[in-house]
Amino acid sequence: MSEQKNKKPKAVILGGSIAGISCAHALILAGWDIVVLEKSNSPPKGSLTGAGIGIDPLGQQIIQSWLPRPELLQEATLPLKIDQNIVTGGDKTTRVLTRDENFNFRAAHWADLHSLLYDGLPPEIFLWGHLYLSFCISEDQTSVNVEAKSLQTNEIIEINGDLLIAADGCLSSVRRTFLPRVKLRYSGYCAWRGVLDFSGKENSEAIIGIKREYPELGNCLYFHLGSGTHSVLYELPKKKLNWIWYVHQPEPEVKGNSVTMKVSSDMINNMYQEAEKVWLPQLVQVMKETKEPFLNIIYDCDPLEQICWDKVVLVGDAAHPTTPHGLRSTNMSIADAAVLGKCLQKWGVENLPYALEEYLRVRVPVITKQVLHSRKMGRIKQGLPLPDCEPFDLHTASPEDCEELQQKNMPFFSGVPFWAE
Ligand SMILES: Cc1cc2nc3c(=O)[nH]c(=O)nc-3n(C[C@H](O)[C@H](O)[C@H](O)COP(=O)(O)OP(=O)(O)OC[C@H]3O[C@@H](n4cnc5c(N)ncnc54)[C@H](O)[C@@H]3O)c2cc1C
């Protein structure tokens, strides 16, 4: 066989976050060579970057198939067997609105999941500290040339490959090249978020108090509903509590390329005061003891019909910016990677258009429904108007209305297809 025939196909992956490293795993398994371009200077190892993530059963299965030892995932996560929606009444007693004991997600810290996936990959495939600049398809249409700049030396490099995989997040520059008119949609609310590290403080008043009010922490994903607002609370490994509080506000103006806002101490103090009016004192205490809470601006995007072009494919948040209410971003990214890997393996690089076509046909129907359902769940839980029914009202909601709050209603909740019909 000629050398050319033996040569492995090569993909340039833009973005070294969850979608990018998931694609690296999936494509290496499919027999591809990989280069990952990432603008961050180094892998976020040992850092506390990010907060909590819920991994669905399919995501767990896929991640385990990529790890040298499947039990590593169990060790890095805590169970989230229960999905529960609760409300506190005027008499300060908590009422359960819905409870699903077959939820079977697992909770991870973003940085731990990232490390777990990163550690299973050859480090030499990563180009850290490299900012993607542009791409072009070769004149004979056989390859894609990607230009990037080293942020350390300002040197411009060019990498040639058979495929560019854009895993560059919800503000994707590659998506903008193809779809310049596509804009993110502001949801109408932002999310205060934080992770309280309580190691060594297990017997503190704050921890005893919060575990009394939310006794199934460590096994349960709590959604606590208020009037026109809701919060989320679950435990992470290594003695951490992850909390989120969604608040209505006009769209903030952000500088730079981020959906996370820098917050001042005045904003944080104001958040505590507002929280005292809405939440149980034990949850407010957890918020107050959390170092550096931050504010995420909640966006999504009307689902895209096109997520691949000739030698370029979108994956992860680049392909489907979504609101967080259905715990979809990370799970959809992992599934995108697994499906893309299988399609490339099935068709081979010589049939790349068929492989990308199958990826599109498998993923677009799923992500379309999941993005729109997450949007709907957010609007229900925030008491916002809905196109087909009255806004959800805690005081008048029937048991059937409450059923809508459950995660298990997410389309394709029990699994997604891997092949086109
Ligand atoms: C540091 C970090 C922490 C996060 N923490 C959480 C969390 O705690 N909980 C949660 O639910 N979600 C978190 N997310 C978001 C979560 O990873 C995504 O919503 C989801 O997993 C999909 O991931 P993604 O890889 O598609 O996008 P992203 O995670 O947004 O990753 C996109 C990557 O592309 C890189 N990139 C973008 N543009 C360029 C460019 N021009 N050149 C080079 N590189 C580029 C970015 O630096 C980034 O690493 C975090 C994301 C990041 C980057």
Image: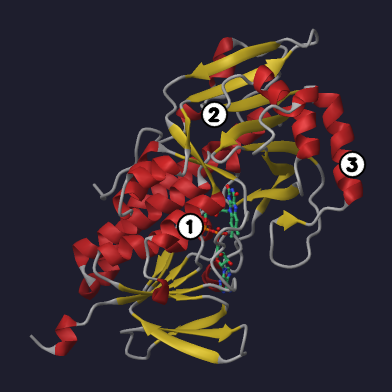
> Which numbered disc, 2 or 1, marks the residue that appears first in the sequence?
1
The three-letter amino acid code for the residue at tag 1 is: Ser
Q: Are marks 1 and 3 in contact (CB under 8 Å)?
A: no
**Which tag is nearer the camera, tag 1 or tag 3?**
1
Q: Say which residue appears at 71% left-offset and 50% top-offset.
A: 297
Residue at x 78%, y 65% (from the top left corner): 255
Q: Which colour scheme is used?
A: secondary structure
Q: How far apart are marks 2 and 1 (CA)?
A: 21 Å
Residue in the foreground of this view, choosing between 365 and 61: 61
Disc 1 marks which residue?
115
In the rendered image, which residue does mark 3 sit on? 269
> In this orientation, does residue 335 appear?
yes
Q: Residues within 10 Å of mark 2 (few under 14, many from 20)?
A: many
Give how far across and how far down residue 379 sits, in percent: 66, 33
N-terminal-most mark, 3 or 2:
2
Q: Using residue 231 as the reference point, say whether residue 57 is left or right of it.
A: left
- Position of 84 with respect to 270 (left or right) is left
Classify mark 1 as within 8 Å of ligand 1 or not, answering yes or no.
no
> Residue 302, position in %: x, y?
57, 50
Whichever of callouts 1 and 3 sits on the residue coming sooner in the sequence is 1
**Above or below, comparing residue 154 to residue 304 in the picture:** below
**Mark 2 is on which residue type?**
Gly
Lateral position of residue 394 relative to residue 374, left or right: right
Categorize mark 3 by other alpha carbons within 10 Å: few (<14), some (14-19), many (20+): few
The numbered dot on residue 218 is 2
Query: Where does residue 286 sit, x and y in percent of width and height?
Result: 75, 33
Q: In which quarter of the image is ligand 1?
A: bottom right
Q: Which of 158 and 286 is in front in this view?
A: 286
